[in-house]
Amino acid sequence: MRRKLAAGNWKMNGLTAQLAEVEALCAAHPSPSVDLLIAPPATLVSSMVVTASDHALDVAGQDCHPESSGAHTGDISAEMLKDAGASHVILGHSERREDHNESDDIVRRKTRAALDAGLKVVICIGESLEEREAANTLDIIAGQLAGSLPDVLTGENTVIAYEPIWAIGTGKVPTLAQISEVHTFIRAKLEARYGEGVGRSIRLLYGGSVKPANASDIFAVPDVDGALVGGASLKAEDFSAIIKALENAA
Ligand code: PGA
């Protein structure tokens, strides 16, 4: 049985005062029946770890460098995130792939570094609108999976988030059939590469404009084990409604 996961990605949002939302969220979910994770900007990782310390809420970084230390001004290593109290790191988000030209190869190297440092990873993949319209979605997904994932991983340390780029921050959501098609495809690819046991144990999140209003429908899709939520994770009230929808689906 895969335990469901509600993950929030704050992106480049959040000052110290925003931690009040995390306090409110923790108060609303004293003993959640699903896993909870938030990835704040790096500046808030340690303070959010303190805010969440007595609660069932894990904290993630949003990126890490492939190397463990060195002359890389402005970058953060996996070991540093771990040291700050993070348990996970998001890797290969489409905004990083686009803003920082991150290739599958770089994402795979970062993933190895994160796993070596003892972090769990949330690896993001997803097609652009042009790719979907050209009916290339499954080829793109297959390529990203093959290139971004290392040869050794487990269901315990790895989560995959399917995030169609055209659905991120746009209010546009794929049909449930489209989500189902891609998640079923990812599951089959994982089973083929890592074996049935590991392939079936890796959690698959859907991400892209998940809101309180559409969460229940999305969570009813087979092989959707939770969500990676951007905008709607910033407000405790919205994220809480999504968490409740996931708890009801679990
Ligand atoms: P969104 O972002 O929920 O604001 O669409 C999702 C993501 O980028 O992880």
Image (cartoon, helix red, strand yellow):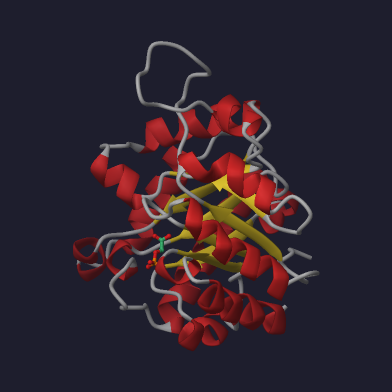
**Direction top: furthest residue:** 71
x and y percentages locating residue 124 in the rendered image: 45, 52
At x 19%, y 63%, the residue is 130
Q: Position of residue 139 (x, y in %)?
A: 35, 55
Nearest to the observer: residue 5 or residue 32: 32
The image quadrant of residue 3 is bottom right
Res 217 visible: yes
Could you tell whether 122 is left or right of 66 in the image?
right
Compare residues 234 and 190 and report the one nearer the observer. Answer: 234
Quadrant of the picture in which ligand 1 is shown: bottom left
User: What residue is shown at x 57% (from left), y 56% (from top)?
Assistant: 38
Q: Residue 222 appears in which quarter of the rendering?
A: bottom right
Provide residue 63's location: percent of width, then percent of height. 45, 39
- What residue sits 57% from the left and 33% below the top? 81
Q: Nearer the viewer, residue 127 or 240?
A: 240
Question: Where is residue 9 drawn, in percent x and y?
Answer: 47, 57
Q: Quadrant of residue 26?
A: bottom right
> Up-down: is 157 above or below 136?
above
Do we see residue 158 in this rendering?
A: no
In the image, is 92 to the left or to the right of 237? left
Front residue (pair 43, 220)? 43
The residue under the point 51% across, 26% down is 77
Question: How many numbered marks are there?
Answer: 0
241 over 21 or under it: above or below: below
Instruction: Tell me the quadrant of the picture where the C terminus can be found.
Output: bottom right
User: Where's the N terminus, which quadrant?
Assistant: bottom right
